[in-house]
Amino acid sequence: MARQSNPALRHLSFMTLLEGGSLIALVLIAMPLKYMADMPEAVSAVGPIHGILFLWMMAVLAITLYRRLLPIHHGAVVAVAALIPFGGLVSHRLVRRRLQARD
């Protein structure tokens, strides 16, 4: 019988991409618009969305770690990568590998 992949890990994988994309949008699009084109509205719109996605991803990460679906050192990599533009891609790859190993 094939083992079901865990929904929490799939959710974390999705959230790493979503949160990472919002950070890229904030840093590479909204911030330059604010400072170079005098459009602070971009940061006012993207900033809170990124903040909510960041908190959501951290909550999913905490649940995943609590359920021991991800080693603590992988969780630390995901948490630190969330602070770095394009780090979401690293996190996504790490979580997807873990998902494939569990299948």
Image (cartoon, helix red, strand yellow):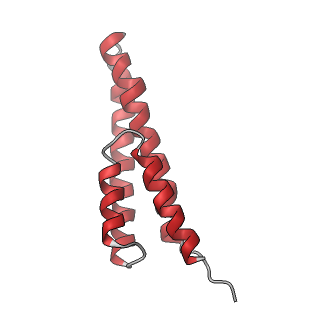
Residue 20 location (% of width, % of height): 43, 44
In this rendering, the answer to whether 6 lies above or below 11 is below
User: Is residue 102 left or right of 22 when viewed as pictured?
Assistant: right
Q: How many marks?
A: 0
Q: What residue is at 48 percent from the left and 70 percent from the top?
A: 8
Residue 12 location (% of width, % of height): 46, 61
Residue sitting at the far top = 37
Residue 100, image quadrant:
bottom right
In this rendering, the answer to whether 19 lies above or below 95 is above
User: Is residue 64 left or right of 83 when viewed as pictured?
Assistant: right
Residue sitting at the far right = 1
Q: In which quadrant will I find the N terminus?
A: bottom right
Residue 23, image quadrant:
top left
In this rendering, the answer to whether 1 lies above or below 9 is below
Residue 47 location (% of width, % of height): 34, 34
Q: In which quadrant will I find the C terminus?
A: bottom right
Residue 36, image quadrant:
top left
Q: What residue is at 35 percent from the left and 15 percent from the top?
A: 39
Residue 3 location (% of width, % of height): 62, 83
Q: What residue is at 43 percent from the left and 39 percent from the top?
A: 22
In this rendering, the answer to whether 3 lies above or below 56 is below
